[in-house]
Image (spheres, grey):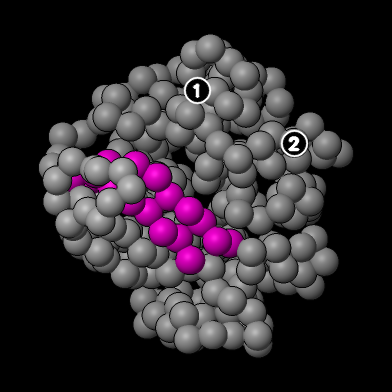
């Protein structure tokens, strides 16, 4: 696939602890801890590279050991990082999550201070190469001003991942303040969608997002699948069956699958099926990115 996809946002180390038994508060719990490479944007870029897309990642790497490991690992996976920056004396991002014994997340903490360096000015210096892309993907680890800059300056279809209930507000605020509010695709989970729209249902949330200027809305519903909406049609697809090993990265894989489907020329809403297949591949793997995703999707 010759399609060029630029992915903008977070890259960090993932530390994922999965309990062996039911959680006991204020105590040491037996379990298994995985350390790997993560970050929403990095995960999306990694999935797309595995699927054969020409992918470039725009992120900030710390000057510490983790930053060097992340930078080198991205290159090893075929991700172009020449538009990224490694900053001396900067701490790399870390994502720490705790999963129950069934693999479902109980809580997580994301230290993504490094991504604050992705400003409108930082992006503007790279605008020429960004706009050579066929598709652009961003996560809301970057700030509201940077998201609004992308909406107002990029020429390729822009896809955004909401990341969390706190950070998803950034894309909604950016839409409200943009000169010409328009966004090709927004992916949120149910909790994020209800939080940013103050809606009572996913259908109501999707309509409010359309009214703000989003053309394609995907609201993931965990085990209940995904709700997809445009101004002309709405669809609800059930989740695909699969053993849950770890849910970290499933939402990132879903959006990567959707972007990949768009790049292949597949029409909405069938793009959601690729997202669901990518998400299933991820939850069946202990890693945030399933290295065998191409064998599952292609």
User: Does 180 appear above or below 159?
Assistant: above
* Foreground pick, 204 / 195: 195
Where is residue 236 drawn, in percent x and y? 36, 20
Residue sitting at x 57%, y 52%: 139
Residue sitting at x 43%, y 50%: 108
Residue sitting at x 64%, y 52%: 156
| Element assignment for label 2 | helix
Image quadrant for the N terminus? bottom left
Query: Is residue 82 toward the left or the right of residue 37 in the image?
Result: right
Residue 173: give its label. 2
Where is residue 285 drawn, in percent x and y? 20, 56
* Foreground pick, 126 / 145: 145
State the predominant SS element of the stretch in magenta. Answer: strand
- Provide the residue span drawn in magenta: 94-112
* Foreground pick, 106 / 77: 106
Residue sitting at x 74%, y 48%: 144
Decide: few, some or many residues near mark 1? Use Cα within 10 Å; few <14, some 14-19, many ≥20: many
The residues bearing labels 2 and 1 have C-alpha atoms spaced at a distance of 20 Å
In front: label 2 or label 1: 2
Where is residue 54 drawn, in percent x and y? 46, 68
Residue under numbered circle 1:
229
User: Does 188 appear above or below 136?
Assistant: above
| Element assignment for label 1 | strand
* Foreground pick, 77 / 10: 10
Residue 43 appears in the rendering: no
Image quadrant for the C terminus? bottom left
First in sequence, mark 2 or 1: give its number. 2
The residue most toward the front is 26
Reply yes or no: does residue 99 show up in magenta. Answer: yes
On the image, which quarter does residue 100 sit in? top left
Residue 77 appears in the rendering: yes
On the image, which quarter does residue 119 sit in? bottom right
């Amino acid at each position: 696939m010759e399609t060029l996809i630029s992915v903008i946002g977070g890259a960090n180390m993932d530390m994922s602890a999965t309990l062996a038994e039911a959680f006991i508060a204020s105590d040491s719990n037996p379990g298994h801890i995985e350390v790997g490479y993560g970050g929403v944007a990095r995960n999306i870029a990694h999935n797309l590279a595995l699927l054969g897309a020409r992918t470039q990642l725009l992120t900030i790497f710390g000057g510490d050991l983790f930053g060097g490991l992340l930078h080198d690992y991205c290159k090893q996976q075929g991700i172009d990082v020449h538009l990224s920056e490694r900053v001396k004396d900067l701490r790399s991002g870390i994502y720490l999550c705790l999963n129950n014994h069934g693999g479902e997340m109980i809580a997580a903490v994301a230290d993504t201070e490094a991504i604050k360096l992705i400003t409108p000015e930082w992006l503007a210096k790279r605008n020429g190469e960004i706009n050579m892309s066929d598709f652009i993907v961003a996560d809301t680890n970057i700030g509201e001003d940077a998201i609004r800059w992308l909406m107002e300056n990029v020429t390729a279809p822009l896809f955004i991942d909401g990341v969390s209930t706190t950070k998803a507000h950034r894309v909604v605020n950016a839409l409200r303040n943009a000169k010409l509010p328009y966004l090709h695709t927004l992916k949120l989970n149910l909790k994020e969608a209800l939080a940013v729209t103050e809606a009572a249902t996913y259908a109501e949330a999707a309509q409010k997002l359309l009214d703000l200027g989003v053309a394609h809305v995907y609201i993931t519903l965990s085990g209940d699948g995904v709700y997809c909406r445009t101004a002309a049609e709405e669809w609800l697809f059930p989740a695909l069956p699969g053993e849950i090993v770890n849910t970290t990265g499933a939402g990132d894989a879903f959006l990567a699958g959707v972007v990949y489907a768009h790049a292949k020329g597949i029409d909405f809403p069938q793009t959601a099926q690729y997202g669901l297949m990518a998400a299933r591949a991820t939850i069946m793997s202990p890693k945030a990115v399933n290295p065998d995703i191409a064998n599952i999707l292609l």
